[in-house]
Amino acid sequence: MNRINKKLQEDKKLLSIYFTAGYPKLNDTVEVIESLEKSGVDFIEIGLPFSDPLADGPTIQASSTAALENGMTTEVLFNQLKDIRKTVSIPLIIMGYFNPMMQYGVEAFCKKCEEIGIDGLIIPDLPVQDYNENYKAIFEKYGIINVFLITPQTSDERIRFIDSISNGFIYMVSSAGVTGAKDSFGNTQETYFDRIASMNLNAPQVIGFGISNAETFQQATSKAKGAIIGSAFVNYITDKGIDKIPDFITTIR
Amino acid sequence: MSYFVDENGYYGQFGGAYIPEMLYPNVEELRQNYLKIMQEDSFKKEFDELLKEYVGRPTPLYFAKRLSEKYNTKIYLKREDLCHTGAHKVNNTIGQILMAKKLGKNRIIAETGAGQHGVATATVCALMGIECVVYMGEIDIARQAPNVARMKMLGATVVPALSGSRTLKDATNEAIRDWINNPVDTHYIIGSVVGPHPYPDMVAKFQSVISEEIKWQLKEKEGKENPDYVVACVGGGSNAAGAFYHYLDEKEVGLIAVEAAGLGVDSGESAATSVLGNEGVIHGSKTLLMQTKDGQIIEPYSISAGLDYPGVGPLHAHLCESKRAEFISITDDEAMQAGLELCELEGIIPAIESSHALAVFKQKEFKKDDVVVLNLSGRGDKDLNTYIKYFKL
Ligand SMILES: Cc1ncc(COP(=O)(O)O)c(C=O)c1O
């Protein structure tokens, strides 16, 4: 069974962290992952940086630009991760935009992920339909789970369709917007969280975008299986350095 | 082979809608409605009326006698430079502002590089009394001060794009992010035949008035609708799409797309996407784009801000791959000389984008009785500073 599915069966609320590979320094990637696992994080999204990350807010734009300037590439990332399964056992997901994967070759990319022990991919700009028609078979061949996004604007009908082709979890984007830290969620979010919870979907939901602290983590996971923190974590390591990662995680739960 | 968009939003292998789920409802709403709205009588009537009374269409198809003599062929200039606001861009913004109104949107966003599309968008927003926000790279804001001032006078808010290389591609990213953040009340007026389906098709259709007019105008002047060649410059490709549109299926009409070679195709400072680019995804569309082997988008260079884009629209990628159109590249120097030549021979100061198209006559020889229609996409007022610097005027 894929590590993601196993993790989703655990009887607890899941905390996931997103960070940009190759940031703050090119060779920090592995240390960040190891430190996150030791701090009790349930799974990790490793951001493959892209020059034009159009679903991301200023924080992740800046970390992506810095990582690229540091010399991060797809090849470098795969090299950094080649022995990651010797030290890390929690699920690992690569999150990145479609163009770098397309240039590497979607099949070659998935194959490499399988070799390394990457469990899933999140590709915000790969349309659901395109995946379903052209890439699903490849992902399945290499046992890679593709994670789809839904937003407050996604219709029930489309959510049902996305649920029907999801074999891991559904990534619930918390509000209409790009990535970025928020201090709290308002009524609109609560209503949306409730709406999705009441749909009784097959795939568990994990909420991301705007989760930044214990309060937003608590709000999100009261309605969903887990929550993902991205920008707030990137901001934190920008300010405090990667040595302080455990301190950040203890403030969340 | 078809050169028109298929029902899935593709031109051959190019096109589609590679957008994050957050944009799906907006783009889907547009996709489901744009053709229907464009066919409504009330829409057509208002669009045609505004093009006539406000933009000043039809624009002349002018026989350039002295230029023709010099190059020993028959050259007609399609005078898009005489459109209100100084370029073809306004054909599209008129269409899209009417579309936005039909869709019930009350806020407009746009990206701009040189500022021409920003000005054309700010203009139609002023005309309709609709809020307008234009994203423009911080570096472009500094290089194109007069157009920034024009947008402000027209009531638009100009927001600097501070991310990435702080030019057109980043302004486009910022506009897309704004749309993600404002999914309900906002319409994004994209400035060329780029972006996710249905934008390339919608913008091409709004610009197709150019070739629609060329057909009847040429019939009046030459007794035939079809020239031997149509020539246009390509940034994203909207003026070329408009000039080519009604000739795409007319095999005997040669289509020539002119890209900016910058300092030279091999100089590392170029925007010649058809030569330097390969298939990839940019701004929601699968097309030809300039990128590293890792798939990071490369910042292009051209003296002309309007051609300074790392991709081309998917229609043009298809025209290039299928060889329906011939793609040529023109350097900064060749374009500047061709621009000056038009001033001296015909008394017309062209936009530097259009000057690239004009340089075709130095690179390609036409027959004496060939009829060549060249789309003069814009006027040179906006480029005066660049001309002054270049020619030390
Ligand atoms: C006068 C003029 N011509 C051409 C272009 C290039 O755009 P497109 O290729 O979409 O026509 C621009 C863009 O700003 C322009 O201002």
Image (cartoon, rainbow, N blue to C red):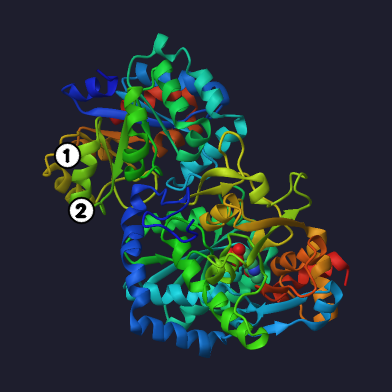
Determine the residue located farthest toward the right in the rendered image.
B392
Q: Nearer the viewer, residue A216 or A230?
A: A230
Q: Nearer the viewer, residue A176 or B370?
A: B370
Q: Amino acid at mark 1?
A: Lys
Q: Quadrant of residue A132?
A: top left
Q: Is residue B98 left or right of residue B380?
A: left
Q: Nearer the viewer, mark 1 or mark 2?
A: 1
Where in the figure is residue B19, as x and y percent of width and height?
A: 40, 49
Which chain contains the residue that carries disc 2? A
Q: Which disc number belongs to residue A187? A: 2
- Residue at 55% over, 21% down: A27
Tell me what residue is drawn at x 19 percent, y 34 percent.
A203
* Amino acid identity at mark 2: Asn
Q: Position of residue A130 (x, y in %)?
A: 36, 43
User: Are the residues under badges 1 and 2 in a single subunit?
Assistant: yes
Vertical placement of residue B381 versus A93, above or below: below
N-terminal of the pair, mark 1 or mark 2, is 2
- Relative placement, left or right, of B159 versus B272 is left
Q: Residues within 10 Å of mark 2 (few under 14, many from 20)?
A: few
Question: Residue B278, located in which quarter of the rendered image?
Answer: top right
Calculate the distance from the C-alpha at mark 1 to the C-alpha at mark 2: 13 Å
Residue pointed to by mark 1: A223
Residue under the image location 61 percent in, 53 percent down: B323
Residue appearing at x 37%, y 28% in the figure: A138
Query: Which residue is the extreme one toward the bottom?
Result: B53
B210 or A68: nearer the viewer: B210
Q: Residue A17 location in percent, x, y?
A: 36, 30
Q: Quadrant of ligand 1?
A: bottom right
Give the side of residue B320 with respect to residue A63, left or right. Answer: right
Q: Quadrant of residue B65?
A: bottom right
Judged from the image, the secondary structure of the residue bearing numbered disc 1 is loop
Percent across and percent down for residue B273 are 64, 50
